[in-house]
Amino acid sequence: MMKRIFSALLALILPVQAAVSQPADEAGARKARSIAQLQSEGMPTIDHLPTIEPESESTRRNTKAVVQRTIALAIVAVKGETGDHEMGQALIRQFDAASFFTPKERVFMDDPDPSDQDRTNFAWRYEGVHVMLWALGITSDLERPDHICDVPFIANTLRELGTDGLMRRAKLRPQKELLDAADLIYRYDWAAVNARLKGEEPPAGLDKGVVYERHYALNWLTGYMDQDWDDISTDT
């Protein structure tokens, strides 16, 4: 009798255990794929670097939010690169983007004479635009982070499409693809940071600036720690 009751309890418990363990398996499999890719490139890896969140615990951004983030990043990057305040204001009008900026971006865009450091920091946001265009299905792949993105391509694409055209063309990739990219860049970033801490150059030709900006953008896309854009962490 007790054996039958125990068997019945097991039958109730096991499906629940399977459901609970599934996300961990998904995250573990994603980690294993990333490590295999990095090792094939001759990149250092560490097994105890954690998994990232599974799909069920990640944030799914809506397409409109990603489009607006793309436009905002492009505009702050142009002002960062050129230092041209009037051009920045003209781009805001052209893309009807006044409401797209974060508080820190708004301060930068309102400043007619930003510091060189601020300009440099915001110019790097082209890399975030590159990630967003990939996430929206406008570009086909995220190539290895060992070189800066194609800025003229970004400029031409956004000029041709505008905000409305980008919204019409956009098709946000499946969450699985976004998480795969987030997991991979997390491990690239660990390798870059580890090299810096050891006083070495980034391994296998990585560009540490590109790696950081991609990590930042992908953490926002997947809702890492529910942080707003201005507060994104890129922990390694």
Image: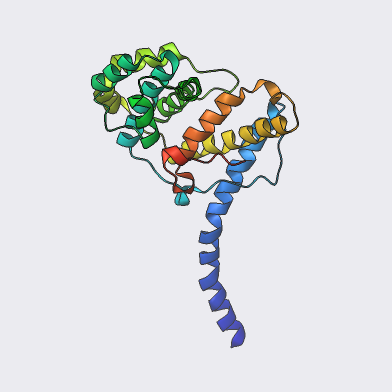
Of 224 and 6, nearer the camera is: 224
Residue 50 in the image: state x and y as whole percent. 63, 47
**Residue 35, placed above or below residue 150:** below
Residue 227 seen by the camera: yes
> Residue drawn at (37%, 41%), measured in percent from left and top?
61
Give the quarter of the figure containing the N terminus.
Answer: bottom right
Q: Where is residue 75? Give x, y as percent.
A: 36, 22
Q: Is residue 201 left or right of residue 133?
A: right
* Point 40% across, 25% down: residue: 133
Residue 105 figure quarter: top left
**Front-lying residue, 123 or 10:** 123
| Residue at 42% across, 11% down | 152
Residue at image point 59% right, 37% down: 186
Residue 116 shown left or right of residue 39 in the figure: left
**Coloured how?**
rainbow
Q: Position of residue 184 (x, y in %)?
A: 58, 35
Quadrant of res 68 = top left
Look at the image and tell me whether residue 171 can be seen.
no
Residue 24 horizontal/vertical position (percent): 57, 53
Q: How many marks?
A: 0
Left-right relation of 116 to 97: right
In front: 22, or 158?
158
Quarter of the C terminus within the rendering: top right
